[in-house]
Image (spheres, helix red, strand yellow):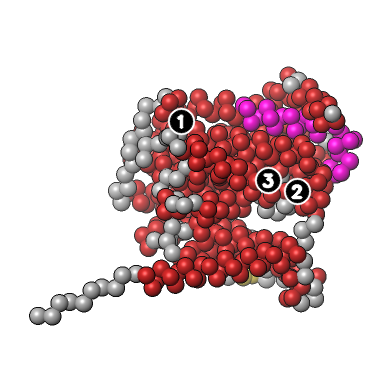
Amino acid sequence: MDLLSNMALGFQTAFSPENLAYCFLGVFLGTFIGVLPGIGALAAVSMILPVTFYLSPTAALVMLAGVYYGAEYGGSIASILLNLPGTPSAAVTCLDGYPMAQQGRAGEALFMTTVASFVGGSVGIVLLMGFAPLLSQVALAFGAADYFAVMLFGLLAASAISQGTPIKGIVMVVLGVLIGCIGADLETGADRFTMGFHNLFDGVSIIALAMGLFGISEIIASIRGSQRQPPKVITFRSMLPRPGELKRSILPMARGATIGSFFGTLPGTGQTIAAFMSYAVEKKVSRTPERFGKGAIEGIMGPESANNAAAQTAFIPTLTMGIPGAATMALMLGALMIHGITPGPMLMTSQPQLFWGLVASFWIGNVLLVILNVPLIGLWVRILTVPYHLLYPAILVLICIGVYSVNNNVFDVYLALAFGVIGYTMRVLGFEPAPLLIGFVLGPMIEENFRRAMLMARGDYLSLFDRPISATLLALCALLLAWTFYTTARQAFRRPRPEPEAAV
């Protein structure tokens, strides 16, 4: 009964004219900014944050939250239509979303993305409503060794994203880790692999890396004659999935929501890791993994569900413990403090109207995203009717603006161009960019948590096996690595040998 009364209070607060208007404005601006390549949720919330200083605390948080998860949804639109990840977490959507658009199924891909986003977001909100304190305690139980083991398992699982042999996936993961090592050392602050470029002291921008590997490499490929099917006339029936695909989408959405909810509650992980982990899991459990990368609906539904579930559950450690799970959540934390509200375990009891009003606004915002975006699918798909010679110069300009706007640094634009050439070269050689990107994201996190675990254990490597969570995950890592080498060796021995020439 307490939950029902709290939700009644929340909806009463969220449905006030002021909060409802700012919720709509937030999701609308978030979606619009998310479509622009390279901007992302962090930049969107940063731009809107000064405006909220003049609003009530509840209206400010409702608007910022709408911008946040609206941008996460909008990022998948450019990924599907143009192979441009609007946000880092939407990069995995490029793998199967863009091939569907090339096959003339862009409307179907966008519609199913909306469904997956709604389902994932709804699961995350339910967990936030009923299990926020419990999930906070679970997140607190994770130590540095456990985080290291989780990240390492994710790193090895990322090799499954590759379309080629597992060894190629591992090579790309290692290359991503090496690129992630560029910049200042975490402990000493010394330069590492900067090659004399002071602009690399803070590391390589993930936006520059993602835009180059996916966006600019696609532009280069299109110049060399890459073709796509023209989009069909968009009707509601044409947006519906093919027979059997809706049934195949149910379990990926459920698994994606579970994975996203788990990683969303862990401080420092977030949507990007959740989306890539979901994709790796879907490819592993699929009976036809060869379809992935060629327009498999599961490759969209799982990651999009995970992405939006993680976006919602990321509020759990932020609101209940005052621990921001990501940079965007740190801005939310700052907004709370600016309005004189201290987040923590007592927030639910000291500020029930704000807490439950915010939770209720999540439901309203998710419904508004569906109402806003399903009618706009036809408009988004019309982008594909623009001729190549007009579309791609405009895309290149948007990429440069998006990359530059993150740090206001022209050097990042040069990096994006360089990674575009590298991405196209990898495409020609049969290497996939997605494992490289997840290696780049997870590498610094693995290093940070491994060093922290070693400092706490005074350099004792066996201490990693003292905790049951880390010991179990490290055992799974060993099994996954052994299985990878076994399957690679089996494929090598099964290759047909060339028949000897007939004797004359």
Which residue is tagged 3?
A: 261
Quadrant, the N terminus? top right
What is the secondary structure assignment of the residue under circle 3?
helix
- Mark nearer the N terminus (1 vs 3): 1
Number of disc labels: 3
Give the image quarter of residue 59: top right
In space, the residues marked 1 and 3 are separated at their CA atoms by 27 Å
- Mark nearer the N terminus (1 vs 2): 1
Circle 2 packing at 10 Å, graded few (<14), some (14-19), many (20+), is many
Q: Could you tell me which residue is drawn at 80 percent across and 76 percent down?
A: 458
**Amino acid type of the residue that numbered disc 2 sits on in the rendered structure:** Pro
Which residue is tagged 2?
A: 324
Q: Could you tell me which residue is drawn at 45 percent across and 25 percent down?
A: 236
Question: Is 194 positioned to the left or the right of 291 in the image?
Answer: right
Magenta stretch: dominant secondary structure: helix
Question: Is 481 positioned to the left or the right of 432 in the image?
Answer: right
**Amino acid type of the residue that numbered disc 1 sits on in the rendered structure:** Leu
Q: Is residue 310 above or below residue 490?
A: above
Q: Magenta stretch: give its range.
A: 343-368
What is the secondary structure assignment of the residue under circle 2?
loop
Front residue of 213 and 409: 213
Which residue is tagged 1?
A: 240
Residue 344, x across and y down, in percent: 85, 44
